[in-house]
Each structure stands twice: as structure tokens, then as C-alpha cells.
Image (tube, helix red, strand yellow):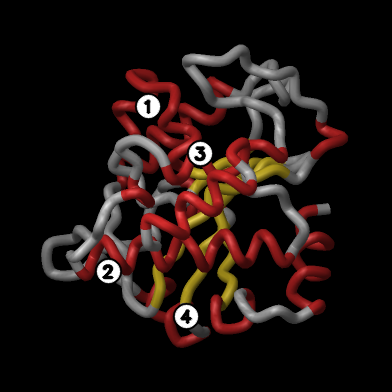
Amino acid sequence: MTKKSKEMLLQDNAARFTFYLTGNTETNQVRSELTRRLRLHQKAEVYITLHHAGIPIYPDAKPVLFSSKHPVSSVSMQSFPLFYSSREIKQLGADTTKIKNSRSMGVLLAEKYIYVLYNTGSSLLKWEYRTEIRVNAFLQYYLRGNPYPQPPEVRAIMLGRDMGTALRLLTSTGGYKKSLFMLDTCLLSSVFFCITSQTAVMPVVSTSTFCLDFLR
């Protein structure tokens, strides 16, 4: 985005866009590296998918749950589903150091489960087993008591380009250095769902209806 367009958004709705467009933030820096640009594009696919499903994605549209600077809100399950991006979670600072290398795009809170969201695009994403295990443990510990009375079960949703990508996920052995996604004993091995982004990011009612029914 140009400087002028950023200023326009901040002037129009500062409460919504200050989080994204001010300071040393990922979306406020020029990204020339292909991998970083691809990462931002995959994040956008996740946000658009959730937006079509009517799930709040902007910080000003949901309770404050991950913050070291502001009082944490008491979250009612009546407000579910809610999505919190990885950037929002990292506002906790040192508490998230051990999960900073996670490939997740954020977490989706639903009544029964927490869903960690990933987007693998058209290829296998990088995967660090121990980091994703820590994500599972962190979410269960941090969200116990607010909003979940008991440690919640953590599941996962994987977005991919098409069903061919889904097949690659299911049959992957981790690549030559075992650094790519593969089915293991992490949170994705027991229950994970795959959504093709070619369909999900398109403005079709069926996708939104499916997402809401799925979360219920």
C-alpha cells in the first residue's frame, strides 16, 4: 500500500487499522523477498475465508484476549466463533517466545474446540514438530478459565490450494531434511480439516454456510 492509502485508512477508521499500519509491524514494511510476500498472501486468504463466513477478524470487533498492555476481557462463549491472528497472540511478548516459529496463521475459538489455522498454499509448508506441540500446550494453558472452564481440545484447519495439495499433505514424509509438514503425533495427527482456498476465498454463500455449520 502507498503512504497515501495508509493515511486514508487511518483517518477513516483509526481504531481498526492502527494495529496493522503503524509502528514496526509486518504489514507496514516493504517485503521484497518472495517467501515473505507469499506468507502475507496466505494470511490474506485466511482472513478473507473467515470474513466470508461472518467471523470477526479485526481487533476492534472482538474482546481483548491476548495482550500484555491492556486488561484482558472476560469472553463469553455466546460471542463465538472468534478469530485471533498470530500477531495478536504475540502481543503477549515473552509468553509466546517458545511458539514464535509456529507456522499457524492464528486461532479460531469455537464452543467445543480451538482450531489452529494454517495455510500451506500449493506446496508443503515448513513444519517444526516441537513448536506446534508447544502451541497446543500454550493454548490449553492460557485459555483455561477464560473463556473455557476446562483445558480445551485443540484441533486444526489446514487451507491448501486444491485437493491435490490435500493428498500431498496426507502422504508427505517430511521431505529430504524432514523439515516439511508430515502427519505426526502433533495436534494435526488426530483431528485436522482441509479446506481448499480456491473455493474458500471466492465470495460464495455455500462456503460461508459450510464454515458456520462446521463450527457449530
Q: Are marks 1 and 4 in contact (CB under 8 Å)?
A: no
Amino acid type, callout 4? Arg
| Residue at 56 percent of width and 77 percent of height | 196
- Label 3's element? helix
The front one of 131 and 171 is 131
Q: In the image, which is nearer the foreground, mark 3 or mark 2?
A: 3
Amino acid type, callout 1? Thr
The front one of 40 and 104 is 40
Residue 173 numbered tag = 2
| Residue at 70 percent of width and 43 percent of height | 82
Q: In the image, which is nearer the foreground, mark 3 or mark 4?
A: 3
CA separation, marks 3 and 1?
Answer: 22 Å
Split into 4 quadrants, where in the image is the N terminus?
A: bottom left
Q: Residue furthest bottom?
A: 164
Q: Residues within 10 Å of mark 4 (few under 14, many from 20)?
A: some
CA separation, marks 1 and 4?
Answer: 29 Å
Amino acid type, callout 2? Thr
Image height of 29 relative to 163, above or below: above
| Residue at 31 percent of width and 46 percent of height | 129
Residue 18 numbered tag = 3
- Label 4's element? loop
Q: Find disc 1 in the rendering and name its residue.
A: 96
CA separation, marks 3 and 4?
Answer: 31 Å
| Residue at 48 percent of width and 46 percent of height | 187
On screen, residue 51 versus residue 90, left or right, reads right
- Mark found first going from the N terminus, 2 or 1: 1
Q: Residues within 10 Å of mark 2 (few under 14, many from 20)?
A: some
Q: Find disc 4 in the rendering and name its residue.
A: 161
On screen, residue 193 versus residue 32, left or right, reads right
